[in-house]
Amino acid sequence: MGSMATPVVDPVGTVAILSGEAPELAAAELLTLVEGEGWRGSAKLLQPRLVLVRPALEAPLAAVALERLGLTHRLIALWAEAHFDGSPASLPQRVPLPEGTFCVRVERVSGSWPTLDVPQLQRTLGERWGTAPRNPVSLVDPGTEVRVVLQGELAFIGATFGTIERGPFQKRHVRNRPFFRPVSLSPPIARALVVLSGVRPPQAILDPCCGTGGFLLEAASAGVPCIGADIDSQMVQGALANLDHLGLAATAMVSSPLGELGALLRGRGLATGGMVTDLPYGRSSTLFGSTPERVVEDVLALAMEVLSPGAHIVLVSPQPIREGAVPEGLEVVDRFSLRAHRSLTRYIVRLRRRAPDPAAEAELRKA
């Protein structure tokens, strides 16, 4: 959950400070979320920890982003940009402070200006921008936190809208669950992939190979209804134990082979707005006699069966999903890769369900 600041007036954009983990994925997560809420504009990844969003996110949308994002650290309502040469004189003489107390925080991104005297710069700017009695400086409980973000020669000046605290993600870390496997994704990455699916409440997200329930934990904690399934009943019970341990719940949990899952969901009246899953890593004990290639085929066939046109499936796998393995009814939106350690790289692909081709469907009916 994000901490909130007093909304500010007339922002010209929004600056997102990323967590630093998987920057391209983080930028895609941010863009997916805000576009899903109706926002239209551009989100430019300036460097591994900085995204510039224009036009500015309005306060209600920024609040939603702070509640749901996994790989963003902070959102700043942008007032101005400047060319910074190391001197306070290169920064604006005035900023549009709302009435009330404020403080100045200077943030150096990715090692910028390592020898800069940050406390002195903060004091200088506080004296310049503060006007008593309208805007006194307060370091204890400021009404507005003015943030100066330095990235090389660029300076972004604005007000902190909110910061996403990492504590809740740590509570859901694999080490803090009663049932886990060491190869589980980190909670922020799992949250980002849930967001990347584009599923928004009241739609439900489906994980057909749920394992220990990492995606279910992140969906449920973000308020997204979730359906978990796995061919291994021990995994289903373990995922349920993890959800219960954290005071969360799934819409439904089932043990089912992939080939039977679509019919089972329909029989229970369960619909899904999108899918996300971390495919089994090829151990014979988790594949129940199948092969990694067959699992990919079955998961994609299930997506064709249960997803509506325009809905997405996000797949994580230890090998890239070949273009030739993707059925005609699905299209690749984007791909990412995450290096977990020397012997494991995770490959992520997001696919979208195509609108059906009436002519092709007619041919199928004839056949």
Image (cartoon, rainbow, N blue to C red):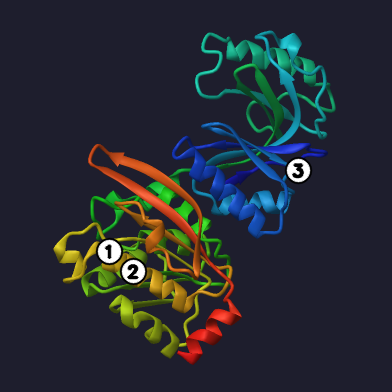
* Residue pointed to by mark 3: 55
Badge 2: few (under 14), some or many (20 or more) residues near its Cα, within 10 Å? Answer: some
What residue is shown at x 74% (from left), y 16% (from top)?
Answer: 91
Name the spot of residue 215 as percent of width and height, x first.
40, 60
What residue is shown at x 29% (from left), y 64% (from top)?
Answer: 211
Name the spot of residue 15 as percent of width and height, x first.
65, 36
Labels 2 and 1 touching (C-beta < 8 A): yes
Q: Quadrant of the C terminus?
A: bottom left
Q: Nearer the viewer, residue 60 or 207?
A: 207
As helix, strand or loop, the secondary structure at mark 1 comes to helix
Q: CA distance from mark 3 to mark 1?
A: 43 Å
When asked about the image quadrant of residue 179, the answer is bottom left
Q: Is residue 360 among what the camera can see?
A: yes
When asked about the image quadrant of residue 355, the answer is bottom right
Q: CA distance from mark 2 to mark 1?
A: 6 Å
Q: CA distance from mark 3 to mark 2?
A: 41 Å
- Position of residue 11 relative to residue 121, above or below, is below
When asked about the image quadrant of residue 151, the answer is top right
* Residue pointed to by mark 1: 293
Q: Is residue 192 left or right of residue 322?
A: right
Labels 3 and 2 touching (C-beta < 8 A): no
What residue is shown at x 49% (from left), y 48% (from top)?
Answer: 70
Name which residue type carries label 2: Glu
Name which residue type carries label 1: Glu
As helix, strand or loop, the secondary structure at mark 3 comes to loop
Q: Nearer the viewer, residue 102 or 21?
A: 21
* Residue pointed to by mark 2: 297
